[in-house]
Image (cartoon, grey):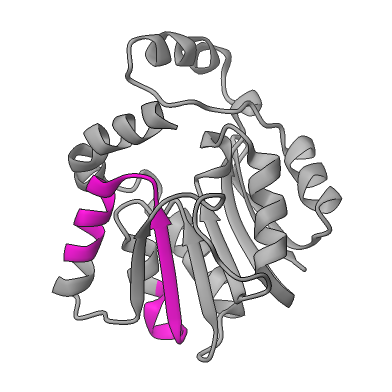
């Protein structure tokens, strides 16, 4: 965990400046998510990074709690929210396992581009299920490392050795769907912008 915090703290300034690789896909994910969000909802986003997605969704809900392990990421996120005059996002440093949230306290949980970066994604999914109210939704976007081209799969371990890439779990879509359904979720929507990533809305 310490290595992950250090990696993302170091990466934060560069990450904040990085352009979205597929703007059309990103906007479709935002649109799908907002089809589910309701004005009186309380939402949790874990792995919120520099807060861009939380800020976009903030007008659609009552409150967002946005968490990340990186203090540097959160510093940028807080400044962005302030600049945008957004006051219904609470930023907290920590992980799903570290922070004490009451069971069934959220209407939606967002885990975007994060599950494949966790050392124990199964525990995270189980925690999300426990935190959601009955009928609540879990929105996730996950890189399918096993579906990436061979060259990229081979270079990831080298990048990790050099400190240029974080921990990643090699999901296939089948494994990810199985993990969600075993936790008790029902898959409500599934969309693949390309074969190496999948966007899922799952209901409790």
- Relative horizontal placement of residue 90, taking residue 196 as reference (left or right): left
Residue shown at the point (35%, 36%) measured from the top left: 5
The residue nearer to you, when weighing 154 against 74, is 74
Work out whether 83 lies above or below 184: below
Q: Which quadrant of the view contains residue 21?
A: top left
Q: Read off the magenta span.
A: 57-79
The residue nearer to you, when weighing 142 against 184, is 184
Residue shown at the point (39%, 9%) measured from the top left: 161
Report if residue 29 lies within the magenta region: no
The residue nearer to you, when weighing 201 against 4, is 4
- Relative horizontal placement of residue 17, taking residue 59 as reference (left or right): left
Q: Position of residue 187 (x, y in %)?
A: 78, 60
Q: Can residue 201 be seen at all in this image of the molecule?
A: no
Residue shown at the point (65%, 59%) measured from the top left: 128
The residue nearer to you, when weighing 158 against 191, is 158
- State which quarter of the image contains the C terminus: bottom right
- State which quarter of the image contains the N terminus: top left
Q: Position of residue 203 (x, y in %)?
A: 75, 68
Q: Position of residue 158 (x, y in %)?
A: 42, 8
Q: Position of residue 38 (x, y in %)?
A: 56, 87
Residue shown at the point (20%, 38%) measured from the top left: 14
Q: How many marks?
A: 0
Work out whether 37 lies above or below 193: below
């Amino acid at each position: 965990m310490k290595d992950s915090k250090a990696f993302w703290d170091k990466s934060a300034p560069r990450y904040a400046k990085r352009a979205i690789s597929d703007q059309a896909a990103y906007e479709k994910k935002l649109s799908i998510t907002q089809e589910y969000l309701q004005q009186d909802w309380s939402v949790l986003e874990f792995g919120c990074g520099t807060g861009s997605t939380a800020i976009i969704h903030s007008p659609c809900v009552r409150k967002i709690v946005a968490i990340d392990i990186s203090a540097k990421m959160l510093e940028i996120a807080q400044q962005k929210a302030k600049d945008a005059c957004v006051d219904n996002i609470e930023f907290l440093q920590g992980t799903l396992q570290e922070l004490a949230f009451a069971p069934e306290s959220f209407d939606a949980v967002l885990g975007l581009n994060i599950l494949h970066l966790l050392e124990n994604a199964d525990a995270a999914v189980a925690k999300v299920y426990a935190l959601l109210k009955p009928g609540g939704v879990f929105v996730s976007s996950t890189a399918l490392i096993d579906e990436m081209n061979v060259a990229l799969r081979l270079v990831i371990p080298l990048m990790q050795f050099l400190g240029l890439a974080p921990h990643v779990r090699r999901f296939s879509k089948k494994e990810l769907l199985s993990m969600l359904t075993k936790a008790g979720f029902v898959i409500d929507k599934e969309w693949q912008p390309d074969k190496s990533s999948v966007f899922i809305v799952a209901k409790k």
